[in-house]
Image (cartoon, rainbow, N blue to C red):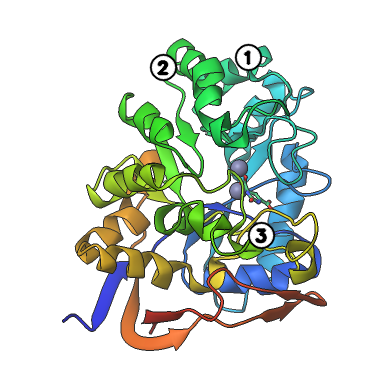
Amino acid sequence: MTDTLTLTRPDDWHLHFRDGDMLLETVPATAAVFRRAIVMPNLTPPVIRVADAQAYRERILAALPAGTDFEPLMVLYLTEATTPADIAAAAASGIVYGCKLYPAGATTNSDSGVRDPSAIMALYEAMEKHGMPLQVHGEVTEPEIDIFDREKLFIDRYLLTIRQRFPDLKIIFEHVTTREGVQFVQDHDSHTAATVTPQHLMMNRNDLLAGGIRPHNYCLPVLKRREHQLSIQQAVLGGDARFFLGTDSAPHARNKKEAACGCAGCYSAPAALPLYAAFFEEHGALSRLEAFASHFGADFYGLPRNTDTVTLKRDPWQVPAHIHAAGETLVPWQAGVALQWRLA
Ligand code: OTD
Ligand code: ZN
Ligand code: ZN
């Protein structure tokens, strides 16, 4: 049995750091493991212009422990007021690595997003021209559409057209949750990829709803049926390079999650790599972890792979029951669960 595992240092291709004092928790937690992260822009107010991204980047860097070489990869939040000139400025900035499409109302702080994703063709065109990747939250938002069908409908209604009209645009289908999402990525070329969260790999909707409602497993897009989980697992375990690590780690205070109307989001950063390692090991595929965590994402974004390494040791530990941060209590995802792998 392998007892140490040394990997190229991984990157997190989808992450929510939040802002203010919370950065003192989230930034060190991620930088302890990951060399880079795609930093989601859904703050209040959102990160819309290059100047917002620059200022947010500085706040993140200021929260780094001394001697850490973590690099935040910033993202602009597309709104109905975003212009092709904003995209050009982002491309020229050297700090922006993508633009995020939030259908208005789809997830936390998405109210400033786009009501009609087919009404911003000029932005996709500018992104294609400037080599700016498009990160997509792929769900329709009409209240009458069943929440379990929203991802598939988004693909049919919007994404296939965008994919066809802008063949050179890099599209990342963020936090894929359905068989149809997996299929969409697999049906297209090397310009189409998906990030995969630990919760959508390791869980299905029974883990949210059977035997009691479990608010700490509630995230958006919501966990789906087991058959969808299996198709995500199959793509990842098969070593398909278009599927790579993106935790979607998204902390909310405990009282906001354990509530009558609980917030969506799993704070997975404190245990992210050991959690993914547990999944790969459980499926006899530990040798596939490195490419998923450390190679495929960088290759897709056209960035160099990291040259340093991290080491995991087989040394059982428990995900902490709670973490105090910014005057709040956070319950990390999988709190109390015993994990075999620990960062050396
Ligand atoms: N999903 N929570 C959040 C974002 C993500 O859709 C997402 O990317 C959040 O709290 O920011 C969540 O459940
Ligand atoms: Zn999302
Ligand atoms: Zn997210």
Nearest to N terminus: mark 2 or mark 1: 1
Q: Is residue 128 left or right of residue 180?
A: right
Determine which residue is flagged by label 1.
Answer: 118
Q: Quadrant of residue 81?
A: top right
Q: CA distance from mark 2 to mark 3?
A: 31 Å
Q: Amino acid at mark 1?
A: Ser
Q: Amino acid at mark 3?
A: Phe
* Ligand 1 within 8 Å, label 3 CB: no
Q: Is residue 191 left or right of residue 47?
A: left
Determine which residue is flagged by label 2.
Answer: 167
Residue under the point 55% across and 18% down: 158
Q: Is residue 181 left or right of residue 313?
A: right
Q: Nearer the viewer, residue 123 or 312?
A: 312
* Residue reaching furthest to the left: 1
Determine which residue is flagged by label 3.
Answer: 17
Residue under the point 40% across and 42% down: 228
Q: Position of residue 258 (x, y in %)?
A: 74, 66
